[in-house]
Amino acid sequence: MIEIKGLHKYFGALHVLKGIDLNVEKGEVLSVIGSSGSGKSTLLYCINALEEIQKGAVIVDGVDVHAKSTDMNKLRQNLGMVFQQWNSFPHLTALENVALAPQIVKKHSKTDALAIAEKQLRHVGLGEKLNVYPSALSGGQQQRLAIARALAMEPEYMLFDEATSALDPELVGEVLETMRMLAEEGMTMICVTHEMGFARDVSDRVAYFHQGVMEEIGPPEQIFGDPKSEHTKKFLANVR
Amino acid sequence: MDYNFHWRPVFNKLPELLSAGLTTLEVATLSMIIGIFCGLLLAIARMSDNKLIRWPATVWVELARNTPALFQLFFFGFGLGAFSIHLSPYFIVVAGLAFNNAGYLAENFRGGFQAVPDTQIRAARSLGMTSTQTYIRIVIPQVLRIVYHPMTNQMVWAVLMSSLGMMVGFRELSGETQFFASKTYRMFEYFAVAALIYYAIVKVILGGAKLASFRLFRY
């Protein structure tokens, strides 16, 4: 379980997250929506400690993420992350991209790491592209590669930071399809997204962020069908 | 014009000149290997937040880039001699060239590091890699590709700069050429042949670097 308690985050004088309280249960799919600059991506970075926090706490399976004594590198293995700019490693083939972390972080043998990588690449539908360099892959394929790379660490949680925002429209579908598949397999997911269709169909809950505050959270039917907050109503009216 | 060319003395000494050419290649290569290693450390040091790490690295880079390479060799030769540290000519040349290479390469590397997006580092760290693993497995391989051509140029430059070795009594290709030329007074002939040997060495390096780049950078 991920517990976020009274979380505050500043970038210098800029107050980006203003006291977020949020729990995500095992197996849950949470979509986080909101306009740009609302702090939703920053929230993800605070969960796997890619950003420091100024106040509050993030607790993953009972471990305080931002405590000095916490082994961040160990914790991150359990929190897979997929970025907006897919960030495939350009100097490694698809197979090597996925096999690297299992080999050097989890200390699997090279043979085992490659086997894990192949399995995950097949899982996301890249079985034909094992020995291809990322430059020869489309954006959608690179994003699926990034998903496979995160999955290879066998995380219990997956964080998606606008995974489809940088993709050409015709490539969005294949990535959403992969995310949908993970959700159906029972993966715990937090998806920061602008894809309202995905948020509505796949999530168990949807949270709406506005200027660093979580305005509203609830089941997708309620958020999309009967939003309580004026800000949420306005946002949804604009994106439709 | 009453100068008569005599090439025979030069051809008689060709084996010695070619062997000196190998010495030139050897000191240049060695000074590059040390230079790449030190240059990487300097580049990383110059990006450090710690003044005590950043400052000495900056001094090194500034001196290496803004003073004559010959003076840098003299420092390792005669400068250290003032402190009763006497290096052999071989070490003076290797150390002097390595010092110079490291300074130039450090600036290239720094540019290379800045060209690798931060998001690559974030992605690697999000997989649980330590910052050292991220540098060694993700950042540095990408930097090496970016700086590959500047590095090749520096290698050529190291070969040519090694001719300064003759000023500290080292018998690399120039020193050897000077030695024989002054014995026979066939200055033009000896140096013309030596120039051809330098030219051949450089061409071999450039060709080798090009071939290696096809093999190294398949992406």
Image (cartoon, rainbow, N blue to C red):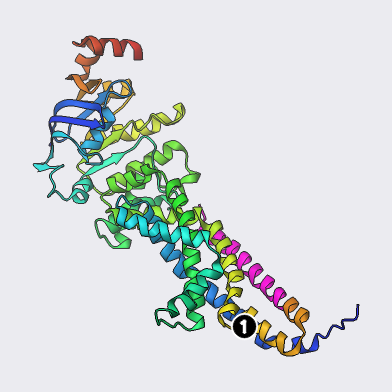
Up the image or down, A227 lies above or below B156; here it is above
Chain letter of disc 1 in the image: B
- Residue at image x 17%, y 30%? A8
Q: Is residue B115 left or right of residue A83?
A: right
Q: Quadrant of the N terminus of chain A?
A: top left
Please name the residue shown 37% across and 60% down the image: B56
Side of B70 relative to A143 (left or right): right
Mark 1, secondary structure of its residue: helix
Magenta span covers which residues?
B194-219
Residue A112: x and y in percent read 29, 59
> In this rendering, is residue A30 above or below A96?
above
**Which residue has dot 1 on it?**
B20
Left/right placement of residue B123 relative to residue B151 reads left
Residue B161: where, in percent of width, then height? 59, 70
* Badge 1 amino acid: Ala
Asked if the magenta segment contains residue B216, the reply would be yes
